[in-house]
Amino acid sequence: MLGLRVKGFCAVINETSGAPLRDVVILGIGMLPARLAEKALSTGHAEVRVDSPVTGLDYDGARDCWHVRCEHAGQRRTVCGRRVVSTIPLTGLLAILPGSGGGAEPGLGRDLLYGSLICVFFGIDGARVSADHWTYFPERDIVFGRSSEPANWSAHMTPAGKASLCCEVFCTENDAVCRIGYAEALEAVRKHLAQWPALHLAGRTGAFEYMNMDGVMEQGRALAGRLAEAP
Ligand SMILES: Cc1cc2nc3c(=O)[nH]c(=O)nc-3n(C[C@H](O)[C@H](O)[C@H](O)COP(=O)(O)OP(=O)(O)OC[C@H]3O[C@@H](n4cnc5c(N)ncnc54)[C@H](O)[C@@H]3O)c2cc1C
């Protein structure tokens, strides 16, 4: 798969034929993980659970396995496995590791601040506002940094005869300052987590790396390949 920006809209094309994958364009990027889940389930060896926040991770050194505690529809459950791949934001992961941080230094990860976003949506009577996927507003006196028009990704995003506009206000929770020195903080967290070689980080928030969809998918594939080859 290849993500592509074409004349102001985003399409997903087949890598070999170059033809647009129509279903994905209409129904959205969520179709990709949905198809992967279908394929995994069809092997009979996989279980897929959504809406199940992970609330705790315990490492059992004697058995060399992880106990992952999660909740679903008010029920608690523990899943065991030899390897864990985490997409939980790093600061959240640190908070649920063994012993609330696994013997971490006090303040570990404190300087890893995730950017936040306030989305203000407008419903508009009539045709679309522009033909663009995104428009950036770098001016200091404009409170939002980017606007987007969901119907330009898929006509299914708005009722017929209506348009919508999303204005994104980039911010940081509780204040509006980006901290410098995060690279050292990230390195300290990575060093701390290296005590568990079977705990893998993945994804934009999980690995604290500013990746787009294609980068995240590529990283996921590479990690899956390494895990499949590992003893
Ligand atoms: C407004 C916006 C616009 C974007 N536009 C684009 C774009 O046009 N093109 C592009 O390529 N990328 C875009 N991105 C970036 C893209 O969305 C991310 O790179 C991508 O979704 C990251 O994938 P991920 O799997 O790392 O993280 P996510 O998709 O965030 O997945 C992380 C998963 O972990 C789960 N999780 C977290 N904590 C827990 C827990 N405790 N227990 C269980 N599950 C948990 C979350 O529920 C989530 O499902 C955009 C991002 C934003 C916010």
Image: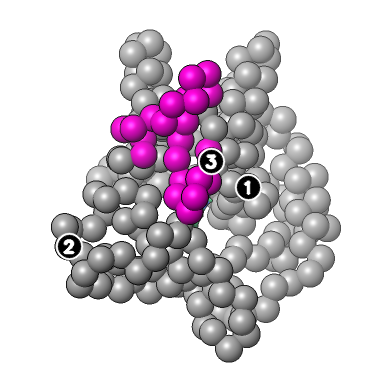
Depicted 162 relative to depicted 60: above or below = below
Count of residue discs: 3
- Residue holding disc 3: 4
Label 1 vs 3, first from the N-terminus? 3
In this image, 197 relative to 10: left or right? right
Q: Which mark is residue 161?
A: 2
The C terminus, quarter of image: top right
In this image, 44 relative to 2: left or right? left
For label 2, the SS is loop
Is label 3 in contact with label 2 (beta carbons under 8 Å)? no
Ligand 1 is within 8 Å of the C-beta of the residue at disc 1: yes
Q: Which residues are magenta?
A: 3-25
In this image, 123 relative to 13: left or right? left
Q: Which mark is residue 211?
A: 1
Give the amino acid at mark 2. Answer: Gly
Depicted 222 relative to depicted 54: above or below = above
Residue 80 on the magenta segment: no
Label 1 vs 2, first from the N-terminus? 2
Question: Measured from the top left, where is residue 214 in percent x and y?
Answer: 57, 38
Q: Residue at x 31, y 32 (%)?
A: 23
Q: CA–CA distance between discs 3 and 2?
A: 27 Å
Q: Residue at x 32, y 48 (%)?
A: 154
Question: Measured from the top left, where is residue 50 in percent x and y?
Answer: 35, 39
Question: Measured from the top left, where is residue 7 in percent x and y?
Answer: 49, 50
Give the amino acid at mark 1. Answer: Met
